[in-house]
Amino acid sequence: MAPAKEPSTTKLVLLVVAWYAGNTFYNVYNKKASNMLHAHWFVASAQLVVGMAISAFLWGTGIRKMPNLTGSDIAACIPIGLFACLAHCGSVLAAAVGAVSFQQIVKACEPVFAAVVGVIIPPADIKPMLAYIMLIPIVGGVGLACIKEGKGVEINVEAFMYASMANAAAALKGKFGSSVTKTLKSDANKNMDAANVYAVMNIISFFCTVPFVVINELPSLNAEWTAAVDKHGFQPLVMNIVLSGFCFYIYNEFAFAFTASVGAVTSSVLNTAKRVIIIVVSSIVFQEVMERNTVLGSAIAIGGTFAYSLTSKHEAPKAKTS
Protein backbone atom coordinates (compact mmCIF):
# COMPACT_ATOMS: atom_id res chain seq x y z
CA MET A 1 0.00 0.00 0.00
CA ALA A 2 1.44 3.35 -1.07
CA PRO A 3 2.08 5.88 1.70
CA ALA A 4 -0.41 8.73 2.01
CA LYS A 5 0.55 11.76 -0.03
CA GLU A 6 1.67 14.74 2.05
CA PRO A 7 -0.61 17.77 1.62
CA SER A 8 0.93 20.64 -0.31
CA THR A 9 1.88 23.88 1.42
CA THR A 10 -0.58 25.75 -0.79
CA LYS A 11 -3.43 23.49 0.32
CA LEU A 12 -2.55 23.92 3.99
CA VAL A 13 -2.34 27.71 3.64
CA LEU A 14 -5.74 27.80 1.91
CA LEU A 15 -7.25 25.63 4.64
CA VAL A 16 -5.95 27.97 7.35
CA VAL A 17 -7.15 31.08 5.51
CA ALA A 18 -10.61 29.56 5.00
CA TRP A 19 -10.71 28.39 8.63
CA TYR A 20 -9.71 31.79 10.02
CA ALA A 21 -12.00 33.72 7.67
CA GLY A 22 -14.96 31.45 8.39
CA ASN A 23 -14.42 31.65 12.14
CA THR A 24 -14.04 35.42 12.14
CA PHE A 25 -17.12 36.02 9.99
CA TYR A 26 -19.04 33.51 12.10
CA ASN A 27 -18.37 35.49 15.26
CA VAL A 28 -19.46 38.71 13.56
CA TYR A 29 -22.71 37.29 12.09
CA ASN A 30 -23.45 35.34 15.27
CA LYS A 31 -23.17 38.48 17.40
CA LYS A 32 -25.37 40.43 14.98
CA ALA A 33 -28.02 37.67 14.96
CA SER A 34 -27.93 37.42 18.76
CA ASN A 35 -28.26 41.19 19.12
CA MET A 36 -31.33 41.13 16.88
CA LEU A 37 -33.11 38.10 18.32
CA HIS A 38 -33.17 37.58 22.08
CA ALA A 39 -33.74 33.85 21.79
CA HIS A 40 -30.15 32.67 21.85
CA TRP A 41 -30.71 28.93 22.26
CA PHE A 42 -32.88 29.16 19.14
CA VAL A 43 -30.15 31.04 17.25
CA ALA A 44 -27.61 28.34 18.15
CA SER A 45 -30.04 25.61 17.08
CA ALA A 46 -30.89 27.36 13.80
CA GLN A 47 -27.19 27.61 12.94
CA LEU A 48 -26.91 23.84 13.18
CA VAL A 49 -29.92 23.47 10.84
CA VAL A 50 -27.98 25.39 8.19
CA GLY A 51 -25.13 22.91 8.58
CA MET A 52 -27.56 20.01 8.23
CA ALA A 53 -28.84 21.51 4.97
CA ILE A 54 -25.28 21.74 3.64
CA SER A 55 -24.60 18.10 4.56
CA ALA A 56 -27.87 16.96 2.97
CA PHE A 57 -26.94 18.78 -0.24
CA LEU A 58 -23.45 17.25 -0.37
CA TRP A 59 -24.76 13.74 0.32
CA GLY A 60 -27.81 14.06 -1.92
CA THR A 61 -25.82 15.24 -4.93
CA GLY A 62 -23.14 12.60 -4.46
CA ILE A 63 -20.40 15.20 -4.00
CA ARG A 64 -19.63 13.47 -0.72
CA LYS A 65 -20.28 9.85 0.22
CA MET A 66 -23.05 9.38 2.76
CA PRO A 67 -21.99 7.84 6.10
CA ASN A 68 -22.86 4.18 6.50
CA LEU A 69 -23.50 3.88 10.24
CA THR A 70 -25.21 1.25 12.33
CA GLY A 71 -27.52 1.95 15.25
CA SER A 72 -24.72 1.19 17.68
CA ASP A 73 -22.40 3.61 15.86
CA ILE A 74 -24.96 6.40 16.19
CA ALA A 75 -25.56 5.54 19.85
CA ALA A 76 -21.82 5.82 20.51
CA CYS A 77 -21.83 9.28 18.91
CA ILE A 78 -24.74 10.68 20.95
CA PRO A 79 -22.72 11.65 24.06
CA ILE A 80 -20.15 13.37 21.84
CA GLY A 81 -22.93 15.18 19.99
CA LEU A 82 -24.38 16.33 23.31
CA PHE A 83 -21.06 17.76 24.43
CA ALA A 84 -20.63 19.39 21.02
CA CYS A 85 -24.10 20.90 21.42
CA LEU A 86 -23.26 22.35 24.84
CA ALA A 87 -19.91 23.68 23.60
CA HIS A 88 -21.59 25.40 20.66
CA CYS A 89 -24.54 26.77 22.61
CA GLY A 90 -22.31 27.94 25.46
CA SER A 91 -20.21 29.92 23.00
CA VAL A 92 -23.27 31.46 21.33
CA LEU A 93 -24.84 32.42 24.66
CA ALA A 94 -21.58 33.85 26.04
CA ALA A 95 -21.14 36.09 23.00
CA ALA A 96 -24.82 37.06 23.11
CA VAL A 97 -24.84 38.28 26.72
CA GLY A 98 -21.34 39.75 26.73
CA ALA A 99 -18.57 41.03 24.48
CA VAL A 100 -17.12 38.68 21.85
CA SER A 101 -13.63 39.66 23.01
CA PHE A 102 -14.45 38.63 26.60
CA GLN A 103 -15.91 35.34 25.37
CA GLN A 104 -12.69 34.61 23.46
CA ILE A 105 -10.53 35.51 26.46
CA VAL A 106 -12.44 33.10 28.72
CA LYS A 107 -12.39 30.42 26.03
CA ALA A 108 -8.60 30.64 26.07
CA CYS A 109 -9.00 28.78 29.40
CA GLU A 110 -10.13 25.64 27.57
CA PRO A 111 -6.77 23.86 28.20
CA VAL A 112 -7.37 24.22 31.96
CA PHE A 113 -10.64 22.35 31.66
CA ALA A 114 -9.06 19.77 29.35
CA ALA A 115 -6.22 19.19 31.80
CA VAL A 116 -8.63 18.66 34.72
CA VAL A 117 -10.87 16.33 32.72
CA GLY A 118 -7.81 14.40 31.53
CA VAL A 119 -6.71 13.77 35.12
CA ILE A 120 -10.01 12.97 36.84
CA ILE A 121 -11.73 10.87 34.16
CA PRO A 122 -10.12 7.50 33.38
CA PRO A 123 -8.07 6.57 31.53
CA ALA A 124 -5.93 9.36 32.97
CA ASP A 125 -4.17 11.58 30.44
CA ILE A 126 -1.16 12.91 32.36
CA LYS A 127 0.70 15.79 30.73
CA PRO A 128 4.33 16.80 31.34
CA MET A 129 4.82 19.05 34.37
CA LEU A 130 5.81 21.95 32.11
CA ALA A 131 2.39 21.82 30.45
CA TYR A 132 0.64 22.14 33.82
CA ILE A 133 2.90 25.09 34.68
CA MET A 134 1.70 26.78 31.49
CA LEU A 135 -1.85 26.74 32.90
CA ILE A 136 -0.79 29.41 35.43
CA PRO A 137 -0.41 32.25 32.90
CA ILE A 138 -3.67 31.19 31.25
CA VAL A 139 -5.65 31.57 34.48
CA GLY A 140 -3.65 34.62 35.53
CA GLY A 141 -4.14 36.31 32.17
CA VAL A 142 -7.89 35.80 32.22
CA GLY A 143 -7.97 37.13 35.79
CA LEU A 144 -5.97 40.22 34.79
CA ALA A 145 -8.29 40.84 31.85
CA CYS A 146 -11.21 41.00 34.30
CA ILE A 147 -9.60 43.78 36.36
CA LYS A 148 -10.81 47.19 35.25
CA GLU A 149 -8.60 50.18 36.00
CA GLY A 150 -10.05 52.15 38.90
CA LYS A 151 -12.92 49.69 39.37
CA GLY A 152 -11.28 46.45 40.49
CA VAL A 153 -12.54 43.05 39.37
CA GLU A 154 -15.45 43.37 36.97
CA ILE A 155 -16.84 40.20 35.43
CA ASN A 156 -19.87 39.58 33.27
CA VAL A 157 -20.82 36.54 35.34
CA GLU A 158 -23.42 35.24 32.90
CA ALA A 159 -21.04 35.41 29.93
CA PHE A 160 -18.27 33.87 32.04
CA MET A 161 -20.48 30.93 33.07
CA TYR A 162 -21.65 30.24 29.51
CA ALA A 163 -18.09 30.39 28.15
CA SER A 164 -16.96 28.09 30.95
CA MET A 165 -19.79 25.70 30.07
CA ALA A 166 -18.49 25.70 26.51
CA ASN A 167 -14.95 24.99 27.75
CA ALA A 168 -16.07 22.11 29.98
CA ALA A 169 -18.19 20.59 27.22
CA ALA A 170 -15.36 20.90 24.68
CA ALA A 171 -12.99 19.17 27.10
CA LEU A 172 -15.46 16.33 27.67
CA LYS A 173 -16.09 16.02 23.94
CA GLY A 174 -12.36 15.68 23.35
CA LYS A 175 -11.97 13.14 26.14
CA PHE A 176 -14.81 10.84 25.11
CA GLY A 177 -14.81 11.52 21.40
CA SER A 178 -11.29 10.68 20.31
CA SER A 179 -11.60 6.90 20.63
CA VAL A 180 -15.06 6.80 19.02
CA THR A 181 -14.13 8.92 16.03
CA LYS A 182 -10.85 7.03 15.57
CA THR A 183 -12.76 3.76 15.43
CA LEU A 184 -15.26 5.13 12.91
CA LYS A 185 -12.53 6.58 10.69
CA SER A 186 -10.61 3.31 10.68
CA ASP A 187 -13.45 1.44 8.94
CA ALA A 188 -13.48 2.54 5.29
CA ASN A 189 -16.94 1.02 4.78
CA LYS A 190 -18.47 3.59 7.12
CA ASN A 191 -17.37 6.57 4.95
CA MET A 192 -16.44 8.51 8.08
CA ASP A 193 -13.65 10.86 7.08
CA ALA A 194 -13.05 14.07 9.04
CA ALA A 195 -15.76 15.96 7.14
CA ASN A 196 -18.42 13.32 7.69
CA VAL A 197 -17.50 12.93 11.36
CA TYR A 198 -18.17 16.63 11.82
CA ALA A 199 -21.38 16.47 9.76
CA VAL A 200 -22.78 13.60 11.85
CA MET A 201 -21.88 15.36 15.11
CA ASN A 202 -23.55 18.51 13.79
CA ILE A 203 -26.81 16.62 13.19
CA ILE A 204 -26.76 14.97 16.62
CA SER A 205 -25.94 18.34 18.19
CA PHE A 206 -29.04 19.86 16.61
CA PHE A 207 -31.35 17.25 18.11
CA CYS A 208 -29.68 17.83 21.48
CA THR A 209 -30.44 21.58 21.27
CA VAL A 210 -34.19 21.06 20.77
CA PRO A 211 -35.03 20.32 24.44
CA PHE A 212 -33.08 23.41 25.54
CA VAL A 213 -34.97 25.60 23.08
CA VAL A 214 -38.32 24.14 24.17
CA ILE A 215 -37.61 24.53 27.89
CA ASN A 216 -35.89 27.93 27.84
CA GLU A 217 -37.46 29.84 24.96
CA LEU A 218 -40.50 28.21 23.36
CA PRO A 219 -43.14 30.14 25.40
CA SER A 220 -41.65 33.51 24.36
CA LEU A 221 -40.15 32.58 20.99
CA ASN A 222 -43.00 33.87 18.82
CA ALA A 223 -43.09 37.21 20.65
CA GLU A 224 -39.28 37.58 20.45
CA TRP A 225 -39.28 36.73 16.74
CA THR A 226 -42.06 39.23 16.00
CA ALA A 227 -40.28 41.96 17.98
CA ALA A 228 -37.01 41.26 16.16
CA VAL A 229 -38.68 41.37 12.72
CA ASP A 230 -40.51 44.58 13.59
CA LYS A 231 -37.32 46.26 14.77
CA HIS A 232 -34.73 44.92 12.31
CA GLY A 233 -36.71 43.47 9.39
CA PHE A 234 -37.23 39.87 8.33
CA GLN A 235 -34.48 39.72 5.70
CA PRO A 236 -31.60 41.07 7.85
CA LEU A 237 -32.58 38.76 10.72
CA VAL A 238 -32.75 35.62 8.60
CA MET A 239 -29.63 36.63 6.65
CA ASN A 240 -27.51 36.93 9.80
CA ILE A 241 -28.77 33.63 11.20
CA VAL A 242 -28.16 31.81 7.90
CA LEU A 243 -24.75 33.38 7.31
CA SER A 244 -23.65 32.61 10.88
CA GLY A 245 -24.76 28.99 10.42
CA PHE A 246 -22.99 28.76 7.06
CA CYS A 247 -19.76 30.22 8.42
CA PHE A 248 -19.95 27.99 11.50
CA TYR A 249 -20.22 24.89 9.35
CA ILE A 250 -17.50 25.73 6.86
CA TYR A 251 -14.97 26.96 9.43
CA ASN A 252 -15.35 23.73 11.40
CA GLU A 253 -15.07 21.67 8.24
CA PHE A 254 -11.87 23.44 7.21
CA ALA A 255 -10.51 23.15 10.75
CA PHE A 256 -11.22 19.41 10.79
CA ALA A 257 -9.56 19.01 7.39
CA PHE A 258 -6.49 20.96 8.52
CA THR A 259 -6.17 18.93 11.73
CA ALA A 260 -6.45 15.70 9.75
CA SER A 261 -3.60 16.91 7.51
CA VAL A 262 -1.10 18.21 10.06
CA GLY A 263 -2.07 16.74 13.44
CA ALA A 264 -3.41 18.10 16.71
CA VAL A 265 -0.34 20.07 17.89
CA THR A 266 -0.09 22.41 14.91
CA SER A 267 -3.86 22.76 14.85
CA SER A 268 -3.95 23.70 18.55
CA VAL A 269 -1.28 26.35 18.05
CA LEU A 270 -3.14 27.93 15.13
CA ASN A 271 -6.44 27.70 16.99
CA THR A 272 -4.83 29.81 19.71
CA ALA A 273 -3.54 32.39 17.23
CA LYS A 274 -7.03 32.57 15.72
CA ARG A 275 -8.41 34.09 18.93
CA VAL A 276 -6.19 37.15 18.50
CA ILE A 277 -7.78 37.88 15.12
CA ILE A 278 -11.31 37.42 16.44
CA ILE A 279 -10.66 39.68 19.44
CA VAL A 280 -9.23 42.44 17.23
CA VAL A 281 -11.97 42.21 14.58
CA SER A 282 -14.83 42.05 17.11
CA SER A 283 -13.39 45.02 19.01
CA ILE A 284 -13.44 47.05 15.79
CA VAL A 285 -16.80 45.88 14.40
CA PHE A 286 -18.72 46.08 17.69
CA GLN A 287 -16.66 48.92 19.22
CA GLU A 288 -15.81 46.82 22.26
CA VAL A 289 -13.54 48.77 24.61
CA MET A 290 -10.17 47.09 25.17
CA GLU A 291 -8.52 48.56 28.27
CA ARG A 292 -4.84 48.09 29.06
CA ASN A 293 -5.47 45.22 31.49
CA THR A 294 -7.78 43.52 28.99
CA VAL A 295 -5.16 43.66 26.24
CA LEU A 296 -2.32 42.57 28.54
CA GLY A 297 -4.38 39.83 30.21
CA SER A 298 -5.63 38.40 26.94
CA ALA A 299 -2.08 38.40 25.55
CA ILE A 300 -0.79 36.52 28.61
CA ALA A 301 -3.67 34.01 28.52
CA ILE A 302 -3.34 33.36 24.79
CA GLY A 303 0.44 33.10 25.12
CA GLY A 304 -0.03 30.54 27.90
CA THR A 305 -2.45 28.58 25.73
CA PHE A 306 0.09 28.67 22.91
CA ALA A 307 2.81 27.32 25.22
CA TYR A 308 0.47 24.67 26.63
CA SER A 309 -0.34 23.47 23.11
CA LEU A 310 3.35 22.95 22.42
CA THR A 311 4.33 21.35 25.72
CA SER A 312 1.29 19.15 26.36
CA LYS A 313 2.01 16.83 23.44
CA HIS A 314 5.41 15.76 24.73
CA GLU A 315 5.28 12.51 26.63
CA ALA A 316 5.25 12.78 30.39
CA PRO A 317 8.03 10.86 32.14
CA LYS A 318 6.96 7.33 32.95
CA ALA A 319 7.12 6.02 36.49
CA LYS A 320 10.09 3.76 37.16
CA THR A 321 9.33 0.10 37.75
CA SER A 322 11.37 -2.04 40.10
Image (spheres, rainbow, N blue to C red):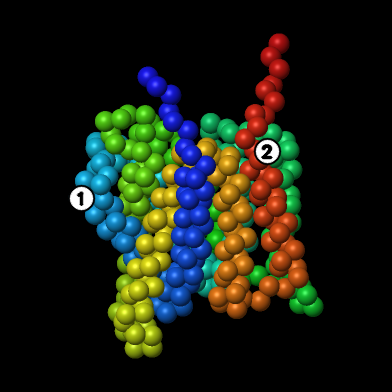
- On the question of residue 299 being in view, the answer is yes
Q: In the image, 160: left or right of 147?
A: left
Indicate whether 232 appears above or below 209.
Answer: below
**Quadrant (top left, top right, bottom left, bottom right) of the C terminus:** top right
Which residue shows up at 61% across the image and 72% down it? Answer: 283
In which image quadrant can residue 43 be found?
A: bottom left
x then y, percent, for residue 21 = 49, 60
Which residue shows up at 31% across the image and 52% down it? Answer: 203
In which image quadrant can residue 115 be found?
A: top right
In which image quadrant can residue 288 be found?
A: bottom right
Q: Nearer the viewer, residue 30 or 106?
A: 30
Q: Which amino acid does label 1 sit on?
A: Thr
Is disc 1 placed on a helix, strand or loop?
A: loop
Report which residue position mark 2 lands on. 311
Is disc 2 placed on a helix, strand or loop?
A: helix
Residue 61 numbered tag: 1
Which residue shows up at 31% across the image and 82% down it? Answer: 234
Bin the neighbour count of mark 2 within 10 Å (Cα to Cα): few under 14, some 14-19, many 20 and up.
Answer: many
Bin the neighbour count of mark 1 within 10 Å (Cα to Cα): few under 14, some 14-19, many 20 and up.
Answer: few
